Structures are given as C-alpha cells and as structure tokens.
Amino acid sequence: MTENLAVTALPTPLAAQLLATSAANAPRLAEFRGALTPYEFDAPAGEIAVLVKGAAAHDLGWMRRVNVRGEDRFRWLSGMVTNIVNDLPNDGGAWNLVLNAQGRIQGDITVWREGDALDLVIAADQYEKLMAHLDHFIIMDDVELVALDATAETTVGLTGPQAREVLVRMGLPVPAEMMTWQCVEWNGLNLRIYHAYGTLADHFEIRTPLAGLTLLWRALSTAGATPVGASALEAFRVAEGIPVYGADIAERDLPQETSQTRALHFAKGCYLGQEIVERIRSRGNVHRHLRQLELDGPLADGGAELFLEGASVGAITSVAELPLEKVTRRFALAMVRSEAEVKNQPLTYGTGPAAGTAKILDKPPAL
C-alpha cells in the first residue's frame, strides 16, 4: 500500500463521496489494491481496537465484478480456476487461484453463484491481467465476460466481532455461514450481503447501488459501526494470516506453497494447471510454505530475510504492528523453507542494526 497519490488509480465511489461532501474533514487517501481509498479516519490504535473488539465500516470499492455469461459458462469457468464451480450452492461462493499451464499462480478471484448466474470478484490491481488471461482461453466456448458497471454500484465492508449486531440493528439479514450471501430490499434499495472469509472476526460485504451509498454509510454509523481505513485493515489482515496476491503470493508460486488449501478442490475435475497441483499432492510436498509469524523485536521490513542457525531459510512478505490495549504485538507473513518448520525453533531477522526473533504460528492468534 502506498500513500503516494501521484498514480493513475482512481478514487473509489466512497472515497469520492467523502471528498465531495466533507472535503475539509475527509480522510487521507492512499492507493490500495489498485484504487484510492481512505487510509485512516482516526489514530491507528483506535481503528485497530474497533476491528478487534467492535464493528468496523470500511471501503471495498476496489473490488471489480464480472458476470460470466453463455451456455458454456459453468464448464469453462470450472476449467479455469482451482475450486468448485459446478457444485457451488445457489447462494454460495468460493475463493480460487488462477493458474497457468505450469501451475504457477496468476492471481486470485472469488466466484459467487446466484441461481444460474456466476459473478467473479477481482481486485482492481489484478483486473486487467486476469481479464486478459481468462479471455485468452475463451476459444470455441459460448462464454462472455461482462464487467459490471462500477459507476452503478459499489461495495462496503463490515468487519469485527460485533458486525452481526450492527446488521441486526439495521434490519438486515445475517448470512450464517462463511462464503454464503443473501439478497434483501432495504429502504428501497436492493442490497446483497456476503459473508466473506475471516479467521479472527466476521467479515461482511454489502453490495449497494451507488445511489444508496450515502444512506448505507450513515446507517452503518448509526447502528454502531466505526469507520476504519486501509492502514488498519491491512494490519488486521496480517494478524488474521490472510495472504494477498502481489504481496504474499507471487506469480512464481505454486498453490501448495501458499498453504491456502481453502482455494483447492482435488475432486472437481480438470482445470488449467491441475496436473501440477495433483502431481504435488500425490508424489510429494513442496519445499517451502507461506506461514504466519509473531515477531519478538522491532518491526521487520517487508522482504527481510529469516535465518536459522546462521542459514537463510525464508523471507518476510508482509508485516503489521497492532497497538492493542495492553501490549503492542507484531505479526508477519513469510515464505519459510520446510527444514525450518520441521525444527520448530525461533527464527531470527534483522532490521538495520536491530535484531529480533520470529515464531511460526500454527493458527491465527487470539488478540
């Protein structure tokens, strides 16, 4: 994430609205996931506390939606992604990796099903690349990828342990299971509420017509949600151990190296890159994995090397510092070689003249 505004990224609908309606008090913007979005509304400690203990309203306007149409849409899409498509429930979704023929990760998308309709959700910073990749493989198929109008709708997030209570106060339904969604009419607006993936708190995504954005944003606040920016959301993501393509997952990586088995389905049939994924599963393991760490020492730099007994055994991909109520904790995601995992000893890292140790976590921490 960068705070440099001299970029080609455009403001999200929410960012544009906040600038237009309260320019003097508008939050600072930053480029995040390919769009300009609010960076901070309040002090970092306050925003982190909301995510850890309360309910945070935030911008998801960097999400791009694409409708997959045509008679062959289910068969074709199933052949392009790593998770289920044909067997998705009518109100369900699945997170997917997109591979090339060599099994290397080209990006990630979420597929949502609504009856016989299929929608893709793609981050703005991956949109052009993934659309070109997918379009390249529409050959003799009756398939059309139709981008949904970003000027007609947008998405707002609601995250935190009290997020459900906020939805109830607003008179909105609460999808009970992760990766399910519900449609509702609310104050004359057709909303879709998605229960997204999370490890430490509930994550909801509310898709709204652009005409209803002001009403929805104010209603979230009235119901008890507090606005937070991309800075706090990024820190909370690292604490949850959820990777992002372009930071923690790269084009050179193989699916099993990411440790994200929730993106893989081994009984779904053939798809692009499936032969490599199956070969790894059946014949042997990869030699490195993406792991979550807790740091004891200074905040490491992204890209910092990790060492065990003097030998380099990995590198940090994302770091975060969480100023909690009683203590400040530091977390990271890192690619770690298997031999370091087997020894299960603290790793070391350096930040300038300072040094620290890193412990590999087997599950996201309690905060």
Image (cartoon, rainbow, N blue to C red):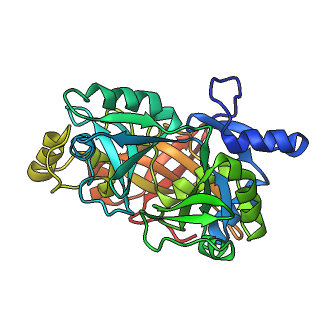
Provide residue 191's location: percent of width, then percent of height. Answer: 58, 59
The answer to whether residue 364 shows anywhere in this view is yes
The answer to whether residue 330 shows anywhere in this view is no
Q: Which residue lies furthest to the right in this view?
A: 24
Provide residue 302's location: percent of width, then percent of height. Answer: 53, 39
- Figure check: 263 above or below 21: below
Provide residue 125's location: percent of width, then percent of height. Answer: 51, 33
Nearer-the-camera pick, 137 or 263: 137
Total labels drawn: 0
- Figure check: 123 above or below 281: above
Q: Is residue 214 left or right of residue 330?
A: right
Q: Is residue 81 left or right of residue 268?
A: right
Which residue shows up at 81% across the image and 39% down it?
A: 19
Which residue shows up at 39% across the image and 63% down it?
A: 91
Q: In which quarter of the image is the N terminus?
A: top right
Quarter of the image where one finds residue 20: top right
Nearer-the-camera pick, 86 or 187: 187
Provide residue 232's location: percent of width, then percent of height. Answer: 66, 53
Quarter of the image where one finds residue 113: bottom left
Q: In which quarter of the image is the C terminus?
A: bottom right
Nearer-the-camera pick, 24 or 284: 24
Q: Which residue lies furthest to the left in this view?
A: 283
Which residue shows up at 68% across the image and 71% down it?
A: 170
Nearer-the-camera pick, 340 or 156: 156
